[in-house]
């Protein structure tokens, strides 16, 4: 089973999350950052190209052996689908068409969701915006592992399986920890996705459907691009709850690695987050950061000081009325 983790509880804090206060300090010193707020006109073309790439892959995958299907799902399709999940992340912040056009953002989210195979665009937005506003809240922030996860997956081998099973925790944890009634747009998202999946199976067969869905799940687990799930908020340095990564995988993940910058300025599109760091380097250069998402996965699994307990938590204070 390997080493047992050294932590027996989460890291509890009674201070506010750090991003609002740092945002205020940065804007006082660099008010020009406000000019970066808004939508990214290039985003819709990049995300659309990813969707079209996956649609083109339907013709390639349908005639392949199962071995090649799974290989393509892990090495190619899963990477594209993970990027599309992060496109849905951008869309959740209305960065595709701006805050003035919320329905355009939602409709584009349905489109970007199609190759992923599982309806997630609207549901992700519902929980993700609360993760920003109530970071670390023991109930509201469903990005936090549960006590059950932390206790069950508390050894080297356990953490390995926890990483592999990450997609299941991301899908089902919110439904258990902070269940919410489905919204109308979630149902629309589900119907559109089901219709797309039905057409894919009807005209291309089950191999193609497996390529899409299994690729999505594999690339959320033990996969280099999935390292950001752990790198973003797991406490690798005591007292620090958000970490950035400035490596090359940002090129295919809409700069989600610039995570301190993103939480400080969620209204800045991912393409412009490096500009935030360039303008205000003294706020980011001297705090802990990651250099490799693959290394993050390795350290998380093998280092007994890190595990599901290595998260900063705050006592639930309830949603503002």
Image: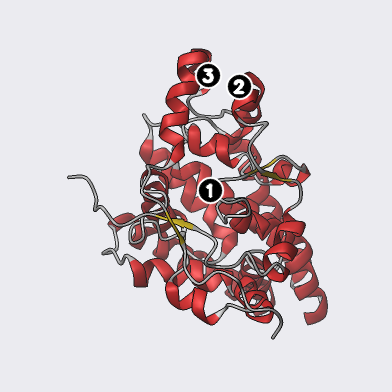
Q: In which quarter of the image is residue 68?
A: bottom right
Quadrant position of the N terminus in the picture: bottom right
Circle 2 SS class: loop
- The residue tagged 3 is 33
Q: Which of marks 3 and 2 is nearer the N terminus?
A: 3
Quadrant position of the C terminus in the picture: top left
Crowd tier of the residue under label 3, counting other residues whose Cα lies within 10 Å: few below 14, some 14–19, many 20 or above: some
Q: In which quarter of the image is residue 285?
A: top right
Residue 239, placed above or below residue 266? below
Q: Which residue is drawn at 74% across and 67% down?
A: 74
Closer-to-camera residue (229/191): 229
Cα–Cα gap, marks 3 and 2: 9 Å
Q: Which of marks 1 and 2 is nearer the N terminus?
A: 1
- The residue tagged 2 is 280
Q: Which residue lies furthest to the bottom in this view?
A: 1
Task: For residue 63, say whether it is visible.
Answer: no
Q: For this view, does 306 lie left or right of residue 56?
A: left
Q: For this view, does 128 lie left or right of residue 272?
A: left
């Amino acid at each position: 089973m390997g080493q047992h983790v050294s932590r027996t509880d989460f890291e509890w804090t009674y201070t506010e999350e750090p991003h609002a206060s740092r945002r205020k300090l940065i804007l006082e010193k660099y008010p020009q950052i406000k000019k970066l707020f808004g939508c990214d006109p290039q985003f819709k073309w990049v995300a659309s190209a990813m969707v079209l790439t996956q649609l083109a892959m339907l013709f390639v995958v349908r005639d392949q052996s199962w071995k090649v299907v799974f290989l393509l799902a892990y090495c190619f399709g899963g990477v594209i689908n993970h990027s599309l999940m992060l496109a849905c992340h951008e869309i959740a912040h209305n960065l595709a068409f701006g805050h003035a056009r919320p329905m355009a953002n939602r409709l584009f989210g349905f489109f970007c969701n199609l190759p992923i195979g599982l309806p997630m665009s609207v549901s992700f937005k519902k929980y993700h915006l609360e993760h920003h506003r109530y970071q670390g809240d023991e109930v509201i922030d469903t990005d936090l592992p549960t006590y059950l996860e932390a206790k069950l997956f508390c050894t080297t081998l356990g953490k390995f399986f926890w990483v592999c099973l990450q997609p299941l925790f991301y899908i089902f944890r919110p439904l258990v920890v902070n269940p919410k009634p489905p919204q109308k747009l979630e149902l629309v998202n589900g119907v559109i996705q089901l219709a797309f999946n039905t057409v894919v199976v009807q005209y291309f067969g089950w191999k193609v459907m497996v390529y899409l869905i299994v690729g999505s799940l594999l690339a959320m687990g033990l996969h280099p691009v999935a390292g950001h799930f752990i790198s973003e908020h797991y406490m690798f340095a005591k007292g620090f709850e958000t970490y950035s990564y400035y490596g090359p995988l940002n090129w295919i993940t809409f700069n989600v690695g610039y995570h301190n910058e993103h939480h400080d300025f969620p209204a800045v599109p991912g393409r412009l987050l490096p500009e935030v760091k360039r303008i205000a380097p003294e706020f980011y250069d001297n705090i802990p950061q990651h250099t490799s998402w693959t290394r993050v996965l390795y350290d998380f699994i093998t280092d007994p000081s890190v595990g599901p307990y290595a998260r900063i938590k705050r006592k639930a204070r309830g949603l503002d009325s």
